[in-house]
Image (spheres, rainbow, N blue to C red):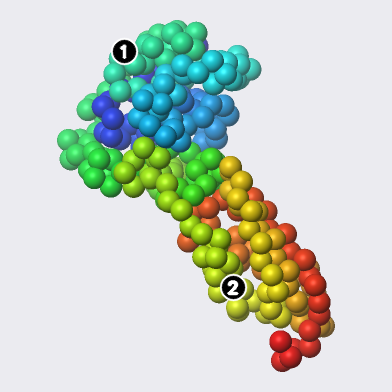
Amino acid sequence: MEVVSLVGASGTGKSYRALIVAKANSIGYIIDDGLLIKENKIIAGASAKKEPTKVAAVRRALFMDRQHREEVTRALRDHSPDKILVLGTSDKMVDKITDTLGIDKAEKRLYINDIASDEEIKLACRQRFVEGKHVIPVPTFEVRKDFSGYFLDTLKILTKRRDDSVTVDEKTVVRPTYSYMGRYTIYGRAIAQIIKTASEDIKGLGRIVNTDISIHPHGIVINIDVSVIYGLVIKDVVDMLRKTIKHEIEYMTSLNVIAINVLVKSLAVEGTE
């Protein structure tokens, strides 16, 4: 396995540029902040950005937890990558990661100052230390369940290739627990109000009779009792209700919606609800 490292101080934009560097060097796998990533999919590990303290985040990034370490080393054995990109804040950190995971030391060492301008690094530092934003080099749907209830945003990066074609890479911005602008709390009644507002313009829906919201480690489950206007296809109404509610809640709250269970309790004649 050929190991390439990308080194830079915290907040200088390593994760933001990880996919670009990987593509430029024909690398299909990335190790970043406790995660093993293949192309744009997480295949093993847990994000250090989910940890409650900076100390715990460092331990996670260095794979010091035995179960975490074994999960990632097992995935490395199963996938047997030819090349892998390892991100770290220093050469020493990269060497610690490779030693811990039992892989070769980095043969090629890249540094953020060689691939990003001073202005780009300055901007990245501002986003980290002023705005509390951290980047994970995978699409938002890959991390939503693990970061349910965190501020999430999506970055789409357009890269022009030599043949003039354009590729689009998606990355996710999070504000971790240990950031001063990290996790937030939203109450069930606020979610119920979002559901009520989102459903008002759905054709064929009579009214929402009852709403129940249960909170789970990876998101929320919503149970809704409704009435539907007689004469319309119930499945179409219910499908649209689910789709609309899921979009609005995930957009407005960053909560991961695990399931929306809709029970049609009654039929109503239009104009009587």
Quadrant assignment, res 269: bottom right
Query: Which residue occupies 63% across, 58% down?
Result: 213
User: Which comes sooner in the sequence, label 1 or label 2?
Assistant: 1
- Residue underneath mark 2: 196
Estimate the x, y position of residue 13 in percent, counting from the top left: 30, 35
**Quadrant location of residue 50?**
top left
Element class at badge 1? helix
What amino acid type is highlighted by mark number 2? Answer: Lys
> Viewer-proximal residue, 99 or 139?
99
Work out how far the residue at label 1 is from the one at label 2, CA to CA, in angstroms: 53 Å
On-image quarter of the C terminus:
bottom right
Residue situated furthest bottom in the rendering: 271
Kindly check if marks 1 and 2 are in contact, taking CB atoms under 8 A apart as contact: no
* Residue at left offset 28%, top offset 47%: 131
What secondary structure is marked by label 2? Answer: helix
- Amino acid residing under circle 1: Lys
Query: What residue sits 53% from the left and 52% below the top?
Result: 255
The foreground one among 4 and 225 is 225
User: 192 above or below 260?
Assistant: below
Instruction: Determine crowd level at label 1: few under 14, some 14-19, many 20+ residues with C-alpha closer than 10 A.
Output: few
Find residue 247 and report its horizontal and vertical position in percent. Answer: 56, 61
| Residue 164, above or below 76 | below
Residue lying at 63% horizontally and 17% vertically, measured from the top left: 78
Q: How many marks are shown on the rendered structure? A: 2
Q: Which labelled disc corresponds to residue 182?
A: none
Do we see residue 177 in this rendering? yes
Measured from the top left, where is residue 67 in percent x and y? 57, 18
Indicate the position of residue 26 as horizontal and vertical percent values.
45, 25
- Specify whether residue 37 is in view: no
Q: Which residue is mark 1?
A: 92
